[in-house]
Amino acid sequence: MISQKTQILLLYNYQKTGIQVRCDSIELFLRHIQELLPARAIDPPIESNIELDKRIANLQIAALSHIMMLIEDLGALSYSFLKKNIDFYSYLDGSGDDELGKIIGDFYDSVLKLKNDDILKILGYVNPNQHRFPTTDDKNMVISLINDNIVLTKRVLANAKIFRESHIKIFRRYKHAGYPILLAPGFSKTDEDLKEKYDFISYALTSKSDLDKELAAAPFSAKVIESYRNLLADLSSLLYSITESHIRIKHKKIDGVIPFVSDCFSKRYSSEIQSRLKLLWDDIENNSLIKEDIVDVHLDAEASYGVWNHNIDFYSKKIL
């Protein structure tokens, strides 16, 4: 098992770099889609609408698949936090009951059954009834904020669960060999009534035996892309907040945090509430056991570069 200091550094790296890398990739796909859309409205079109739709569909499949990666991140981290640890890294090469796919699946299967105490652990919040506050008013304010934030977190997790269930078959076909996905091939016979709702639909072939018997659909419209953007914003904000909470907990050796002014819920806080939270956090900071900043990890291990990178002069040449 890796040390707690390394666990903190890994979580810190995910928060500062990993979330942004995921989001940047998705934004690139969504921005390119937005750039292509005006061409669909030109009459006559600049290029065949069929080919244009295929290009847009390909970007859509990539975007939704990368959103699925964020959802997997959220599942693995939340599972760890429910176990009251931050060692998500140990699941990356897990097996049996600790196999990564299994714990992510188990977590989302349980999302709608999570109790408020479970959400409290995921958010990293202290139990306000077991925490000493300067005044009763401060305590009541924090209880109210926590209850509101629990409700919002449950809604984000529920949406992540629905998105995952709606797209997991497409995601699996996207990342595995062969790309058995038909990009905007026209509406299937059973989907003719959806022409008014969607511009086109792509289909992943998911049957193990008869390809005509099972399809996973990825419909496209402006409303679909809007839903991607909104879910992306919710996921990235929640991931930033929960990682920040657990970094503070482990780094400062405290039992839990209270809501803070930089979390994903803070836009709902009035300026008065934000000022009061800052004062409460000053008290927590002054009484925490650790004051120094988190330092970067020092890499002393020998890295494996593989044959390709050791012989890059040879492999940089085209064969065909």
Image (spheres, rainbow, N blue to C red):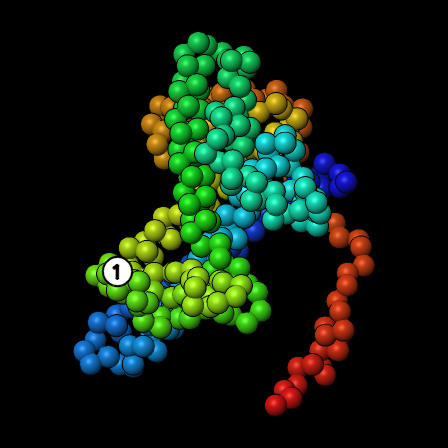
Mark 1 secondary-structure assignment: helix
Instruction: Indicate the position of residue 301 as horizontal and vertical percent values.
Output: 80, 55
- At x 29%, y 81%, the residue is 48
Q: Is residue 169 above or below residue 59?
A: above
- At x 65%, y 88%, the residue is 319
Residue 36 seen anywhere in this rendered image of the structure: no
Q: Is residue 261 left or right of residue 75?
A: left
Please identify the quarter of the rendering in which residue 124 is found: top right
| Amino acid type indicated by mark 1 | Leu
- At x 38%, y 60%, the residue is 218
Q: Which residue is mark 1?
A: 194
Question: Among all residues in the image, which is located at the extreme top?
Answer: 136
Instruction: Indicate the position of residue 223 as horizontal and vertical percent values.
Output: 28, 55
Closer-to-camera residue (309/175): 175
Tell me if mark 1 has few (under 14), some (14-19) or many (20+) residues whose alpha carbon lies within 10 angstroms of its own: some
Question: Among all residues in the image, which is located at the extreme bottom?
Answer: 320
Instruction: Indicate the position of residue 168 as horizontal and vertical percent values.
Output: 49, 54
Q: Is residue 124 above or below residue 143?
A: below
Residue 145 seen anywhere in this rendered image of the structure: yes
Question: Among all residues in the image, which is located at the extreme left?
Answer: 43
